Image (spheres, rainbow, N blue to C red):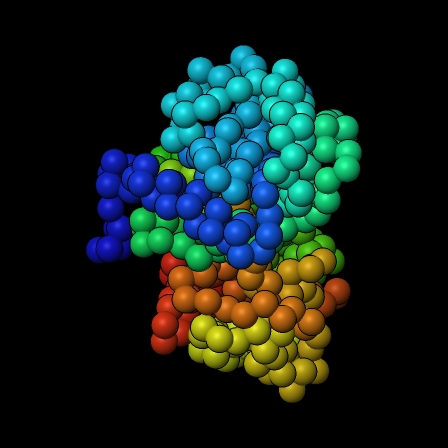
Amino acid sequence: MHPSIELNSKFHEIPEEEYMDRVRSTQAEMAREGYDLIIAWSDSYRMSNVRWLSNYRAFDGIFPYPAIVLVPLKGDPILFVESSLTSIGAASVVKDVRGIRQDLGPVLDEYAASGNVKRVGIAGYKYMALEFWNVVQKSLPDILIEPTVIIDVLKSIKSENEIRNMKVAGYLADLGIEAIKDAAREGATEKELTKEAYLAMFANGSDTVAFDIMVQTGENSSDYYLARPTDRKLKDGDTLLIDMGCRYNGYASDMARGATFGSVSKEAQAMFDAALEAYETGFKYLRPGLTGEEASYPANEVLAKYGYIHSPGEGRGVGHGLGMDPEEELPILAPGMKSVLKENQTLAYVITLLIPGVGGLRIEDSVVIRKDGAESMTNFPYRNHW
């Protein structure tokens, strides 16, 4: 076990006062930006907005179990959950818990009738279900409603309590990829290797999955940015693209490694060497004060030097936000991103190269931005020849 990792979950619990500080920080930003009310949306897949404010996570079920926190400019927040789950919601740090389908509309009607609400921000607007967007519009017909990034920005900067949880999740991801390495043999299928990773992470303390683990071999590694594991069998000369993570105490890890298996081509090895140089160059450059665009340049310049083009995925660039969700809104390290990196922001820093006919790999770590540079929270070796 890594000497800095403690797996006693009581040690990693977020104190109630920290949640209250988050609400107060949100209200302070609302006052600065002129919002009277924020509607923070989450579901079981994008849980971070509501959980960050309340420590409540929506359930995954046969139909969506949504959750909303209303944060007024003054006063206490209200948590709305599925009516059959209000007793669970009552265990959150928000004391006023109500049924989302029964009570959201009437409560918003009251805000509208008060005459004190002129501008409303939606946190999580990209994911909000149409069912509840319709309720919001109906209850607030003459009020300005718009997306807000207040919570996106605030939750991107982590406390040391949160960072400790993320380090444990990162340690567990390291164990998962170690299990894949140990199981890698000619004839092993992608599905078999993936199951070994799940077993290792859950056996050592993971609470739940963060996202679908990807183990892609051979042509599957070179042809697909993301792909679920298949029955394809590992064979000599393959490249492997492995992307994985888990959640610990509600916080996610996201890490990836490339590996070569057996006698790979010179072209594949050259691709791996260039990707690692790009990763190391870009990682050393990360620090507070850079824009997301500036932080994306060094790695891409290295790749261009060798004639490669980064395969960034839609909207991800070389880095994306990471915390309670494996992909959070901020920061994003990509051309055109003007938001500025801040101390204690957490992200997944990532390089992906896909070359059909040659191979594919991804190098990715869970990272926290410190005052003097970046600190990795995942630590599996980068050079992997199995």
- The front one of 125 and 283 is 125
Quarter of image, res 36: top right
- The front one of 258 and 152 is 152
- The front one of 20 and 313 is 20
Q: Please determine whether, in this image, residue 296 is positioned above or below residue 211.
A: below
Whole-percent x, y for residue 63 in the image: 66, 21
Q: Please determine whether, in this image, residue 277 is positioned above or below residue 350.
A: below
Asked if residue 375 can be seen in this view, the reply is: yes
Q: Please determine whether, in this image, residue 268 is positioned above or below residue 96.
A: below
Whole-percent x, y for residue 288 in the image: 45, 73
Task: Kindly give the residue lying farthest to the top in the view shown.
Answer: 84
Q: Please determine whether, in this image, residue 43 is positioned above or below residue 90.
A: below
Answer with left or right where residue 96 lies relative to residue 1: right
Task: Kindly give the residue lying farthest to the bottom in the view shown.
Answer: 305
Whole-percent x, y for residue 130 in the image: 75, 32
Answer with left or right where residue 200 lies relative to residue 136: left
Whole-percent x, y for residue 340 in the image: 54, 70
